[in-house]
């Protein structure tokens, strides 16, 4: 699958976003173990309980037994691309040292980055 196709899946699932408070629709498509797991942001009237699209997708992947994450596409309906928040970066770092991240905006424009670029020093507990 091309990066553009993964980005398109993130754009498609973004339509399911539950975001009545911020009105910011976000979609995530996580490629893991050669499958794609989707997620959207799920907001709550108790704002702090909101879950980001990325963590919804990670939850779907892990629930289905996938652990080897390879690429993540994140879509926003806005003009400006969005980057994963710190909480999502730490949750991604639980499962992989590095990951290709594809950002796509509401106009379908793509930017590329990596987990290691965005989050070079994750918290790692001593085993
Ligand atoms: N959001 C995500 O889904 N992913 C991010 O990486 C950043 C923010 C959501 C949370 C909230 O529903 C909305 O975007 C505005 O912050």
Image (tube, grey):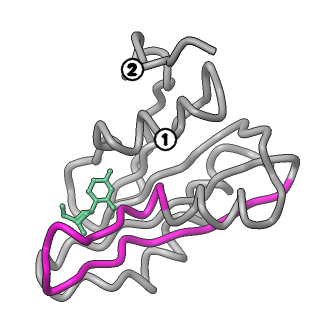
Q: Secondary structure at mark 2?
A: loop
Residue beneath the point at 58% across and 33% down = 94
Give the labeled residue for mark 2: 119
Residue 87 drawn above or below residue 47: above
Image quarter hosting the C terminus: top right
Side of 79 where 111 appears, left or right: right
Taking 121 as reference, is 60 left or right? right
Sequence-first disc among 1 and 2: 1
| Residue 37 magenta | yes
**Placement of 93 over or under 55, stated as above or below:** above
Residue 125's place in the image compared with 47, above or below, is above
Quarter-of-image position of residue 60 = bottom right
Callout 1: few (<14), some (14-19), or many (20+) C-alpha neighbours within 10 Å? some
User: Residue 107, labelled with which disc?
Assistant: none
- Closer to us: mark 1 or mark 2? 1
Q: Residue at x 12, y 82 (%)?
A: 21
Residue at 52% across / 36% down in the picture?
A: 101
Which mark, residue 91? Answer: 1
Which range is magenta? 35-55
Asked where in the image residue 98 lies, by quadrant, the reply is top right
Residue 119 at x, y percent in the picture: 39, 20
Q: Residue placed farthest to the front in the image? A: 127
Total number of numbered discs in the rendering: 2
- The percent position of residue 13, horizontal first and vertical second, equals 53, 76
Q: Residues within 10 Å of mark 2 (few under 14, many from 20)?
A: some
Residue 76: x %, y % from top left: 33, 61
Estimate the spatial distance between the alpha carbons at disc 1 and disc 2, rounded to whole Å. Answer: 11 Å
Dividing the image into four equal quarters, which quarter contains ligand 1? bottom left
Specify whether tag 1 is near ligand 1 (CB below 8 Å). no
């Amino acid at each position: 699958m091309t990066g553009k196709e993964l980005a398109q899946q993130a754009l498609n699932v973004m339509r399911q976003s539950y975001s009545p408070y911020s009105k910011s629709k976000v979609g995530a498509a996580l490629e893991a173990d050669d499958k794609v797991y989707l997620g959207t942001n799920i907001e709550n009237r108790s704002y702090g309980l909101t879950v980001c699209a990325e963590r919804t997708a990670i939850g779907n992947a892990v629930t289905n037994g996938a652990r080897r994450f390879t690429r993540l596409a994140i879509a926003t309906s806005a003009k400006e691309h969005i980057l994963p928040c710190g909480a999502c970066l730490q949750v991604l770092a639980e499962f992989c040292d590095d990951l290709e991240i594809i950002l796509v905006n509401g106009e379908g424009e793509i930017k590329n980055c990596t987990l290691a670029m965005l989050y070079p020093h994750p918290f790692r507990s001593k085993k």
